[in-house]
Amino acid sequence: MLFDKFQEMADFQAELAGKHVKPFGAVTEELLTATTGMVQGKQVILAGTNNYLGLSYDQRCIEAAEAALKKWGTGTTGSRLANGSFAEHQALEAEMADFYGVDHAICFSTGYAATMGMTATLAGPGDVILLDGDSHSSIYSGVKLSGAEVIRFKHSDPDDLAKRLRRLGDRTGNTLIIAEGIYSMLGDVAPLQEIAAIKREYGGYLMIDEAHSMGVMGETGRGAAQAAGIEDDVDFFAGTFSKSLGGIGGFCTSRHPELEVIRFCIRAYIFTASSTPSVVASTREALRIIRAEPELRDKLWNNANRLYAGLENLGLTLGPQVSPVVAVQLADRSQAIDCWQALLNAGVYVNMVVPPATPSTNFLLRNSVSAAHTTEQIDQIIGAYAGLLDSGLLNPDQAA
Ligand code: PMP
């Protein structure tokens, strides 16, 4: 039957319903600040939002959006190729190109459309895509649509990448290598210096998805490639406006002039309505703030260090390195469900992640840190995890 393949999900949903737990699609009934809201009738600290700089609730961004709403109306009612290119979109593209120090930028309606659209279009039949095995779902969707030969290399394993490139011989000239900056599930950062060195040795084109690292890493906030000092080796930077910039939309920037032609070949750009001008305006303001206020990044990393150290001290099994994504690894699904609900009861909302969010994802409680979290809030989050240990719901020895 058509529906047979959904049975496993139906069983999972039944388990959640039996426990009266709703970790997926938990509703924020009211937003109080960038880091607090009402969920299930309770005031909670929002620690699972990707709102890395707290800009989704910044008054300046809200005012920019309000002004654009009044000026341009609620929507564009068309795609960028038809009637949906407003001066706001062009201004954001110019500002993104300037931010990345390149001449070319395309803005998309979502980050998903950006990464899916670029990967689906850059490589085609006869080309090769070499992608990190833990790539985001949008990248997997794109490469499937591309028609290119798709080869996965082991997650963040430069030797495996080199081996596979070597085997390609002179086909590397038609090869697109894809990695991310910060990986969204465990918060680990790709070994970009090694990846860039391999690309220099064997050839190919490199695309980095900076969705979780733009605004978060690098001297001026351009991301993990900037932090690694390898931006000259990156052919395409992709990312999203929905995380550190607090809006919605996606981007690709490049020094290659060909991007302007490629623009007219990306189905996820051509056949979908462009972003509403108000969200473009708030994104532009958020970008201005990221550039003007590097101290936001310092605050973010102070909070990330504090949360990581606090949870490590409790003996929990975390991702391999400190980043604004701090993931606690758990033994199994049932423990994940119980701990997620207990944290919510203790006033902390986090993300529950179950396989296969990425191929190597285990059962996780994923915390994302914000520059807008106060030190007290970070300590409250740590205190809530300590409560899981006290109550016996979580035992460091049984963690994965
Ligand atoms: N790439 C990565 C690595 C992501 O984590 C995400 C979102 N989680 C996206 C792309 C898609 O971005 P958006 O949610 O803004 O569409």
Image: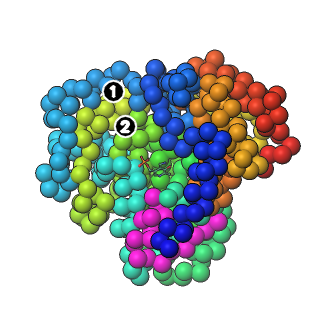
Residue 8: % across, % down: 60, 61
Marks 2 and 1: CB-CB under 8 Å? yes
Measuring from the top left, give residue 309's x and y in whole percent.
73, 31
Residue stretch rendered in magenta on the structure: 138-154
How packed mark 1 is, by other alpha carbons closer than 10 Å (few <14, some 14-19, many 20 or more), is many
The image position of residue 213, as x and y in percent, is 51, 43
Pointer 2 or 1: first along the chain: 1
Identify the image's colour scheme: rainbow, by chain, secondary structure or one colour: rainbow
Q: Residue at x 80, y 30 (%)?
A: 391
- Seen in the picture, residue 229 relative to 271 is either above or below; the reply is above
Residue 319 visible, this angle:
no
Residue sitting at the far top: 376
76 sits to left or right of 351: left
Cβ of mark 2 under 8 A from ligand 1: no
Vertical placement of residue 32 versus 238, above or below? above
The residue identified by callout 2 is 247
Lateral position of residue 84 relative to residue 311, left or right: left
Marks 2 and 1, Cα distance to the nearest angstrom? Answer: 9 Å
- Give coordinates of residue 349: x percent, y percent: 59, 32
Task: Look at mark 1 in the image and give the residue it sits on.
Answer: 61
Residue at 45 percent across and 58 percent down: it is 138
Can you see residue 21? yes
Identify which amino acid the numbered label 2 is placed on.
Answer: Gly
In front: 41, or 336? Answer: 41
Q: Residue at x 36, y 31 (%)?
A: 286
Q: Secondary structure at mark 2?
A: loop
* Amino acid type of the residue tagged 1 in the rendering: Cys
Q: Tell me if residue 154 comes above or below residue 184 in the rendering.
A: below
